[in-house]
Amino acid sequence: MSGTRFRAITSRYEALRVAIVGDFFLDRYLHIDPTRSERSIETGLEVHNVVEVRPQPGAAGTILNNLKALGVGQVRPVGFCGEDGEGYELRRALAKYHGVVLDDFLTVDSRRTPVYCKPMVIEPDRPPRELNRFDSKNWGPTPSDLARDLAERVRALAGRVDAIILMDQVDRDGTGVVTGPVREAASWVADGRSCPIVLADSRRGLADYPPLGFKMNADELARMTGERGSDVDQVKRRAADLAERNRHPVFVSLAERGIVGAGPGSAPEHVPALAVQGPIDIVGAGDAVSANLVAALASGASIVEAMRIAMAAASIVIHQLGTTGTASIAEIGDRLGA
């Protein structure tokens, strides 16, 4: 990709309006200083002394972090947090960004704020070392009135945003933001063509989703199609078939082998991943890919151009250790040589 073309695409980011419909977690990093380790008198167990607490938006919030790092003008989170201290921290972390509109991000007493609590051992001249996480989630069904409210807010996005990203992060269907009514609302918006780009991603797979733009990995594609095998040519064929059925683009991440993308009526393409340069941390790479695919496509990039930009962003993010990182336009341009 030439530098002129890269600048033409990314110069449009500031005018974009993107909605993220999904499960916003609080990422709470606990920085542990091992030199201050103690032994509990009462239990005899080692005490990890936390010297810094670093909160930031996680899960769907990681996509938001990446969109704002790209300079996307307006980002509209659609979701909820609880009436708890974690919800206060999450809203404050979201609100610090200029251009984040929180009108559709609800504070409710019927749900708790999902949290990924990440203890990190910080030592001089060593990469951060993550200990076992402490997660807080909602395991019961999302109340039906809340699901309906969120679905109506998704419908109301029609004609008001340039792209919608659905990020379904929960382990049990129906316990988060992207419930059945929300999925159907997103499909209604996509069918009406009032939003050019609607891209869905779910940690449980997308088999029960209506036809939308899909982002998935090779295993999820195999489960959906009932065909095994992850050879690049096989993935390209299955992705093209699915894009034709959905009438929306399909992207399949292949980890260190890169990404495959297909649009309806167009030949599938494969873009390899960039070479690894030293230690890596893959947390957040998929969210960086989603953010960059959507921003580029909404700014007029072709599927191949969007994937090249997304692969460069992923390469930058995986080399940021101990955090769910982001990539700026300048960093991506440098990585692409554009």
Image (cartoon, helix red, strand yellow):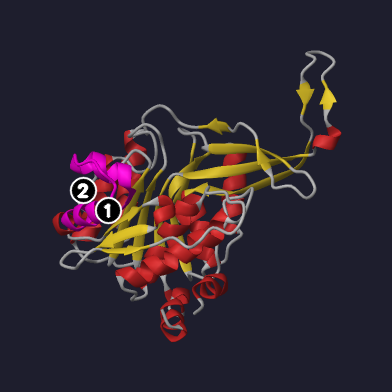
User: In the image, is residue 70 above or below residue 206?
Assistant: below
Location of mark 1 (residue): 186
User: In the image, is residue 320 above or below residue 172?
Assistant: below
Q: Earlier in the sequence, mark 2 or mark 1?
A: 1
Do callouts 2 and 1 mark residues in contact (Cβ within 8 Å)? Answer: yes
Label 1, secondary structure: give it.
Answer: helix
- In which quadrant is the N terminus drawn? bottom left
**Residue appearing at x 15%, y 59% in the figure:** 244
Q: Does residue 227 show up magenta in the picture?
A: yes
**Residue appearing at x 81%, y 13% in the figure:** 42
Q: Does residue 290 show up magenta in the picture?
A: no
Image position, residue 156 (x, y; %) = 31, 58
**Residue appearing at x 34%, y 68% in the figure:** 162
The quarter holding residue 86 reads top right
Crowd band around label 2 with a 10 angstrom C-alpha radius: few (<14), some (14–19), many (20+): some
Image position, residue 329 (x, y; %) = 53, 72
User: In the image, is residue 123 above or below residue 43?
Assistant: below
Crowd band around label 1 with a 10 angstrom C-alpha radius: few (<14), some (14–19), many (20+): many
Image position, residue 236 (x, y; %) = 24, 57
**Residue appearing at x 16%, y 55% in the figure:** 241
Chain part drawn in magenta: 215-241
Q: Main secondary structure of the magenta part?
A: helix
Location of mark 2 (residue): 210
Tell which of 91 and 109 is nearer to you. 91
User: In the image, is residue 61 above or below residue 15?
Assistant: above
Left or right placement of residue 287 versus residue 180 in this view: right
Label 2, secondary structure: give it.
Answer: loop
Tell which of 155 and 324 is nearer to you. 324
| Residue 223 visible (yes or no) | yes
Left or right placement of residue 35 versus residue 100 in this view: right
Comparing marks 2 and 1, which lies closer to the viewer? Answer: 2
Q: Amino acid at mark 1?
A: Ala
